[in-house]
Image (tube, rainbow, N blue to C red):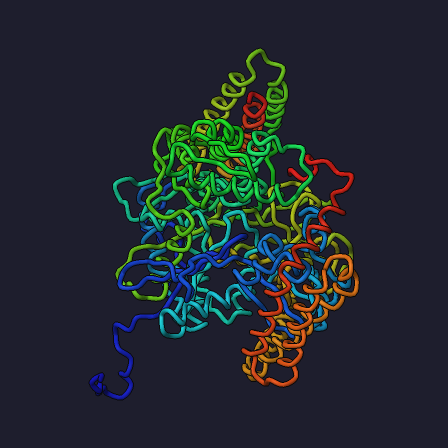
């Protein structure tokens, strides 16, 4: 039976490092699934099948967490005893929030631009670049054991995640109107 | 004669015992069953060699059922008791009936309490055999397929893989599983239809690419579905689905029929018989054009011909509509056309060369068409069933599904908070903590929703339950943990508990639109009672009822218009057949002879039925014009 106490990194045989190799993650995810998936236990008893569902649930949760740049960062902090709920907790960096408002206003303005599609593409690239800066900042803070600052980075990532979603929705809407 | 096998006690089962397993394509129009025999997946046919089982069930007064072709043949005479397209109702609530259109010819029971005593949201169709749900109707189809499989494989089934559309939500999947349970069929797995089609082509076996994008184009008789799948190291992920639930092969028939009526200068005719003939001829012409460049067309005295290129032009707008849906699905999955590696064709209507050609042009590659498009889904399901049954211990195939729609909870202000987002690989368990918002609050309503929208009204309500017995505390002190567990079939279980005091108040939830366990048990009990009844006596009873119906129909028809429509000679022939049937009913004690007498009666009365039907059509059409009958 799988050890549910081990960390997600241990589960997939990965070093506890923010920069993970996605192909190692994908391969060991597949190996674990092949071994523990409920489809391998259709002829087993009720107890074994329940365990299979729980085990793959654990594997899937671990995979979803490590695949996402924000959830991976939050999980690494959790392993260091820094636990928080980013649904409730939020950043108090005034400058950052102001900048977020500006980005959102820019997004709302897109339909009025001369070439809305080109404009929304520009914003998308900008958002991505800023997200990359945040990731680097997290890695530095984490390595220096500055966990409070690292937590701030994670909270900010959440804003960018929402922004990315809005950019995507807007792009789809603009493309739909074109056809 | 087989040699006796001697084995040690406890070692009686042979190590390589083949476990019988099938794949079932439970379709809206037709259903199929397939199995792997000697390493090859094949469709199992009925005793007459038919592969397709029309998904039609007719309920008779004595509780017996007709399933498939027989039910379909009798459909027009017994519309209220003959249920087709039950799949459209699976997992749907009473409220959904309105949006499904008033086109359903059934009468729904108004009271929501079922015959098994418990309250239920499941719509019930009134039939002569009592109220029936879409789940029970689907179970009849599954029973028929199960029986067909056991007869042709010569043994009891260990289990089945049943396919469902990729966009089916939790309630619809649960309803499908409930139907299988009623049919006493063990479900190894519910499998997405497009995934099954990709498996049939062995696309999961191709290792040269680490990631494949597969488009599954499914054009059936009345529906069109497009699915974009991503296959990554054995993991099938549904990236997007789309389509049109009111576009299919029937629309192509309509286009030809309109053309025929115009050419034959009959477009203004009020004769429904001619319209029906035009539709039948249109279907024949459409099918003939698959292998011929030009086909002769006949209607009444008119004769003409239709070329492939004329036909292609005629139906171009319909094909274009499907391609627009393909474009949308690609955009939903953030992909370009040239990123698609394979295009799989499903559904009988993809046999049309024009469809294959245009789809090929759109995706820039010829679509896969080697496997019969009617059978490809069932074949893929059979391959998966064979692996799951354990017949291929070395098989690598593992199909991981994702959840098609997000799951969440209602929070303050009618908003939905997502707990599990769509496209998460399943099975998955996830917990979320909530708290009370009033002092001394001892109960809390947990409302579970499925969908992508922000507000409660715009999502699908799956279940609602109350968590009681929270110890009185100040607002915000209680910690209520709500746990969602989704299994490999995409089915959901939810528990809620209060954590600070260790007081547990967990509830297991069934979707609002599903059946409760006690309802299912009641139905299983009922069906067992039926099976235990003496088969022969039941058959006779069926035929006696049928005899009464036939007699009643004849008597009432003759009472109303025999004098107007029949001459003396015809009346005499009918009455002679009638007395033969009466005799069979009272004297003979076996079902077969009663059945023969009924058949004879029906045959003799055929001309009379036709005459009355024409008369009715004339009356019904008086004052209408032909356009009203075209759609």
Front-lying residue, B96 or B146: B146
Residue that protrudes farthest toward the front in the picture: B569
Q: Position of residue A51 (x, y in %)?
A: 43, 66
Q: Is residue B450 above or below residue B183?
A: above
Q: Position of residue B630 (x, y in %)?
A: 64, 37
Residue plotted at (51% across, 50% down): B165
Q: In this orientation, does residue A32 appear? A: yes
Front-lying residue, B202 or B396: B202
Q: Is residue B189 above or below residue B541?
A: above
Front-lying residue, B532 or A51: B532
Left or right: B48 in relation to A115: left
In which quarter of the view is residue A94 placed?
Answer: top right
Q: Position of residue B367 (x, y in %)?
A: 36, 37
Q: Is residue B151 above or below residue A87?
A: below
Front-lying residue, B100 or B436: B100
Quadrant containing the N terminus of chain B in the rendered view: bottom left
Residue plotted at (54% across, 44% down): B280
Residue plotted at (61% across, 76% down): B542
Q: In this orientation, does residue B508 appear? A: no
Q: Position of residue B123 (x, y in %)?
A: 69, 59
In which quarter of the view is residue B590 placed?
Answer: bottom right
């Amino acid at each position: 039976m799988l050890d549910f106490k081990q960390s997600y990194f241990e589960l997939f045989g990965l070093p506890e490092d923010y920069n993970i190799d996605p192909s190692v993650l994908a391969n060991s995810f597949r190996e674990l699934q092949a071994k523990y998936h409920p489809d391998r236990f259709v002829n087993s008893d009720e107890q074994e099948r329940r365990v299979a569902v729980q085990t793959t649930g654990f594997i899937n949760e671990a995979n979803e967490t490590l695949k996402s740049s924000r959830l991976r960062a939050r999980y690494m902090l959790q392993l260091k005893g820094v636990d928080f709920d980013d649904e409730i907790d939020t950043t108090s960096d005034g400058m950052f929030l102001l900048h977020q408002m500006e980005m959102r206003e820019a997004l709302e303005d897109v339909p009025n631009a001369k070439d809305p599609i080109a404009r929304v593409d520009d914003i998308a690239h900008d958002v991505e670049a800023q997200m990359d800066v945040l990731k680097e900042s997290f890695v530095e803070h984490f390595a220096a054991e500055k966990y409070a600052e690292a937590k701030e980075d994670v909270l900010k990532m959440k804003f960018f995640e929402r922004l990315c979603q809005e950019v995507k929705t807007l792009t789809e809407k603009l493309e739909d109107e074109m056809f | 004669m087989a040699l006796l096998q001697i084995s040690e006690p406890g070692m009686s089962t042979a190590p390589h015992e083949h476990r019988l397993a099938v794949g079932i394509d439970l379709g809206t129009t037709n259903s199929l069953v397939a199995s792997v025999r000697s390493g090859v997946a094949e469709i199992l046919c009925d005793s007459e060699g038919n592969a397709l089982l029309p998904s039609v069930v007719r309920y008779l007064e004595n509780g017996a059922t007709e399933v498939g072709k027989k039910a379909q043949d009798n459909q027009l005479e017994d519309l209220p008791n003959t249920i087709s397209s039950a799949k459209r109702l699976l997992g749907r609530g009473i409220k959904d009936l309105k949006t499904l259109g008033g086109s359903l010819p059934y009468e729904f029971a108004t009271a929501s309490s079922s015959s098994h005593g418990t309250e239920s949201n499941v719509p019930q169709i009134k039939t002569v055999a009592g109220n029936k749900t879409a789940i029970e109707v689907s179970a009849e189809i599954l029973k028929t397929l199960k029986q067909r499989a056991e007869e042709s494989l010569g043994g009891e089934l260990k289990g089945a893989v049943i396919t469902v559309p990729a966009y089916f939500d939790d309630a619809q999947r649960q309803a499908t599983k409930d139907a299988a349970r009623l049919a006493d069929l063990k479900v190894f797995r519910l499998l997405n239809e497009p995934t099954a089609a990709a498996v049939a082509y062995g696309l999961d076996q191709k290792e040269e690419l680490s990631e494949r994008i597969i488009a599954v184009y499914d054009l059936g008789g009345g529906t069109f579905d497009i699915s974009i799948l991503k296959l990554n190291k054995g993991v099938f992920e549904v990236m997007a689905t789309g389509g049109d639930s009111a576009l299919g092969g029937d629309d192509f028939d309509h286009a030809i029929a309109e053309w025929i009526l115009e050419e034959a200068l009959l477009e203004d005719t009020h004769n429904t018989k001619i319209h029906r003939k035009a539709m039948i001829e249109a279907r024949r012409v459409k099918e003939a054009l698959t292998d011929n460049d030009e086909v002769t067309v006949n209607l009444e005295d008119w004769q003409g011909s239709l070329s492939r290129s004329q036909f292609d032009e005629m139906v171009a707008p319909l094909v274009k509509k499907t391609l627009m849906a393909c474009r949308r699905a690609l955009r939903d999955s953030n992909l370009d056309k040239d990123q698609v590696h394979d295009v799989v064709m499903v559904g009988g209507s993809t046999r049309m060369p024009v469809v294959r050609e245009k789809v090929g042009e759109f995706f820039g590659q010829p679509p896969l068409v080697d496997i019969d498009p009617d059978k490809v889904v069932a074949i893929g399901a059979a391959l998966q069933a064979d692996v799951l049954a354990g017949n291929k211990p070395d098989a690598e195939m593992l199909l991981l599904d994702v959840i098609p729609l997000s799951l969440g909870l209602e929070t303050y202000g009618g908003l939905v908070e997502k707990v599990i987002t769509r496209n998460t690989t399943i099975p998955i368990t996830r917990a979320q903590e909530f708290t009370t918002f009033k002092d001394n609050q001892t109960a809390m309503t947990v409302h579970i929703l499925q969908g992508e929208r922000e507000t409660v009204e715009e999502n699908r309500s799956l279940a609602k339950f109350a968590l009681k017995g929270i110890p009185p505390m100040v607002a915000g002190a209680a910690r209520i943990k709500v746990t969602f567990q989704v299994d490999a079939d995409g089915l959901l279980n939810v528990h809620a508990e209060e954590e600070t005091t260790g007081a547990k108040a967990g509830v297991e939830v069934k979707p609002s639109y599903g059946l409760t366990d006690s309802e299912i048990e009641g139905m299983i009990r009922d069906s067992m009672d039926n099976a235990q009844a003496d088969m022969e006596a039941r058959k006779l009873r069926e035929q006696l009822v049928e005899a009464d119906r036939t007699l009643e129909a004849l008597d009432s028809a003759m009472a109303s218009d025999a004098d107007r429509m029949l001459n003396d000679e015809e009346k005499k022939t009918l009455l002679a057949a009638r007395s033969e049937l009466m005799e069979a009913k009272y004297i003979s004690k076996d079902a077969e002879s009663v059945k023969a007498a009924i058949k004879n009666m029906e045959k003799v009365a055929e001309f009379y039925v036709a005459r009355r039907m024409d008369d009715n059509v004339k009356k019904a059409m008086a004052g209408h014009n032909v356009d009203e009958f075209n759609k």
